[in-house]
Image (cartoon, rainbow, N blue to C red):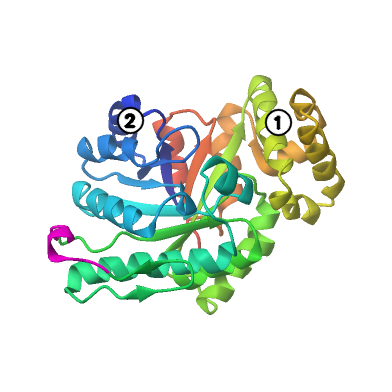
Amino acid sequence: MKVDALLGAVEDAAEAARRAEAAGYAGAFTGEVAGDPFLPLVAAAGVTERLTVGTSIAVAFARSPMTVAYTAHDLQRLSRGRFVLGLGTQVEAHVVRRFSMPWDRPVTQLREYVEALRAIWRSWSDGTPLQFEGEHYRHTLMPPMFVPLPHGFGPPPIHLAGVGDAVTRLAGEVADGFVCHAFTTDRWIRERTLPALAAGRGGSLDGFTVKATLFTVTSEQQAEQVRGHLAFYASTPAYRAVLELHGWGDLGVELTRLSKAGRWAELAGLVDDEVLGAFAVVAAPRQLAAAVSARCAGAIDRVSLLGGPDDPQLVAELSAVTRP
């Protein structure tokens, strides 16, 4: 199993990437939360030699496929073939009300998004006319002066993120890897995610990457912080199926009600120890590696830890875990 670091603010990315590479991490990834997910990777790629750099994730529907194709091409060149493009849909409220972009049928649109990216990259590499016409995206103009210089590293792998069965199955069908949402459980991954990916792939996950970001809890202070994060995610109806698998659907309904009433301070108190233990790896610091290994073994290829210590020994222990 490969262990990845998480990069934060762009001004800290270069030094954080240097430390991650020295500590033995396999990669360094960014998410799209309160800043641009691509800019820190420019800094990280420029100061490292072997570290995989990537997004996990960038919001696809906030950008045109053409814009992302150029950015990904440049990052693949800058990193000398070490870039991974992770994409997700986000939820309707954020796409429409935060990014002011259209929302229709997200699974269909995401499929077309990936197809458009590959068509653009193929046009640049092969010199064939760009002629992609879909329901959501249309790319039919590519004058020679707008074709970027080749770099010889090929297109970057595409990882798709999701929660529900439909987008997970789509990832297995059209992508090179899948990014599990942080709001997930071991049971959800094994009973819902992996079967859906396998269905999309035609039965086998050989050569396909499954990446997870796990909340870790090694102190009571961390427990309270993670309860808040989980309560926020659980208040989102789009993620309620994960709760329902465990019989906690009513918790999601109540958290949604409180969030709509603006009673955010009350949410974390509803996340009890049983829920916390299902969504986060809870362990004493010295037992964390064993607990994470047990959670990931046989299911996860790459993992990032939210709240885990920056410990080379922990990285080495986790890197020894393999997925059959």
The answer to whether residue 11 is visible is yes
**Is 63 left, or right, of 81 in this rendering?**
right
Image coordinates of residue 12 in percent, x first then y, are 34, 25
Residue 271 seen in this snapshot: no
- In the picture as drawn, the residue positioned furthest to the bottom comes out as 202
Q: Which secondary structure is most common in the magenta stretch?
A: loop
Q: Amino acid at mark 1?
A: Arg
Residue 13 marker: 2
**Residue toward you, 115 or 151:** 115
Choose top left, top right, bottom left or bottom right for residue 269. top right
SS for tag 1?
helix
Label 1 crowd bin: few (<14), some (14–19), many (20+), radius 10 Å: many
Q: Residue at x 50, y 36 (%)?
A: 33
Q: Is residue 270 above or below residue 155?
A: above
The residue segment tinted magenta is: 141-150
Is 268 covered by the magenta stretch?
no
In magenta stretch: residue 149: yes
Q: Which element type, helix, strand or loop, lies under badge 2?
A: helix
**Which tag, 1 or 2, sits closer to the chain's start?**
2
Seen at 69% across and 35% down, the residue is 232
Q: Disc 1 marks which residue?
A: 227
Q: Residue at x 29, y 67 (%)?
A: 120
Q: Which residue is more in the foreground, 129 or 268?
A: 129
Q: Nearer the viewer, residue 152 or 101?
A: 101
Indicate the position of residue 8 as horizontal and vertical percent values: 42, 30
Q: Looking at the picture, which amino acid does disc 2 mark?
A: Ala
Residue at point 21%, 42% (across, down) = 49
Residue 263 falls left or right of residue 285: right
Residue 18 is situated, as x and y percent measured from the top left of the image, at 27, 31
Residue 281 image-quadrant placement: top right
Q: Is residue 256 above or below residue 294?
A: above
Residue in the foreground of this view, choosing between 213 and 95: 95
